Amino acid sequence: MFDIAPDHAIGLYAGLLTLPFALLALRLRSAARGVPGTVLGASVLMAIAGAIHLGLVWTHRGETITALLFVMNGASYVVLSQLYTWRWWRPASVALITATLTGYLGYIVLNFDTPDQVAIATKLLELTTLGLVLVPVRGETLRRRSRWSVLSVALPLMTMVTVSVVWIDDLARPDAQHAHAGAVLQATNDTASPEQVGAAQKLYDETVAAIAPYRDWHAAWAAGYRPGPQNTPSTHWMNQRYVDAGYVMDPRRPQGLVYANTKHGPVLIGAMFQMQHIGQFGPDPGGPLHAVRRRVQPDDPDRDVPPRLDRHQRAADAACVDRGQPGRPIRRRHRLEGGEAN
């Protein structure tokens, strides 16, 4: 969801290249001079949406139905983008945009496709276009009130449904490489090799053993770890000395510890490795394996018992970008946590 699918990138380029041509077309047409700005804006956005869909035809040529739908959808957008003086332009545009959004959500729910940044940006563009199409213009009297009613109800509803379906689908079928919002992940294979599984398990076992003394947070404090904001279910305790030293995925010197905030006090749930410099990728021994966590019940009476490790869940290290504290630079982090797969 949070990356750009390689076969969708060409659609993004096609849309961006279309923008100056769409603006030039408006400038050259004399009929555009008396048209409201909202209509002209919708025209430009529809041309871009059409170019995006047409750009995706080539990379989906092996999927006959999908490619045909892209052709029909893209051509319809391009044609309607130039028919803004047509009497039935508004109803036709609303019908096309609504059908496109609904069809895309159907594709997502049926698992024919997965959302990525290009698709999400295109849906946002189409929702914006729908809003511009529905805005009443000067000279309208009989339908002005009904148009505002539709705009105030239908557009927010369509936006909510679109966003909800995309997010629910992403949560129900999470990315195999642990991608999430704001993350910049280094490329890896889709399936972990036996060597990667073994290396991740070794790192996991060594880290669990090394951080065992820090189940007592007083020991972590004595070792130089300090907590960040504690108004969340869990808190990162960072050791600035280890950060400055530049240790690279050293189980004995993790730059951070992760504690669950419970009514009984901090409960250790994992360790976190952080690279020293901005934009620096760290080693990736586990490849595509997920981060592994242990869920802690806030009222767990056995909070001082070492975390039980679910042995059928493999160890993992997942790369992520964390924005850290205000004013602090973005750094590359690796996180390793024990128990239940994230």
Image (spheres, helix red, strand yellow):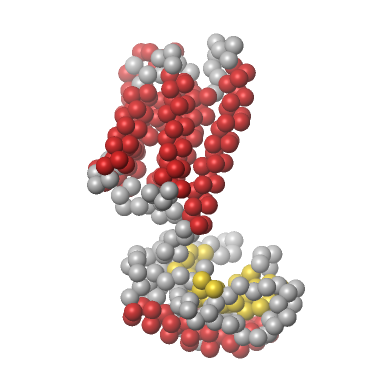
Q: Position of residue 200 (x, y in %)?
A: 42, 79
Q: Position of residue 161 (x, y in %)?
A: 54, 41
Taking depth in this image into account, of 19 and 43 the one nearest to the observer is 43
Q: Position of residue 264 (x, y in %)?
A: 74, 77
The reply to whether residue 240 is in sight is no
Q: From the viewer's perspective, is residue 284 above or below residue 209?
A: above
Quadrant of the image occupied by residue 89: top left
Taking depth in this image into account, of 111 and 246 the one nearest to the observer is 111
Q: As drawn, is 85 to the left or to the right of 157?
A: left
Q: From the viewer's perspective, is residue 15 above or below residue 38?
A: below
Q: As drawn, is 33 to the left or to the right of 137?
A: left
| Residue drawn 34% across the image and 43% down it | 12
Taking depth in this image into account, of 329 and 217 the one nearest to the observer is 217
| Residue drawn 38% across the image and 82% down it | 198
Q: Position of residue 27 (x, y in %)?
A: 35, 20
| Residue drawn 52% across the image and 51% down it | 167
| Residue drawn 54% across the image and 36% down it | 158
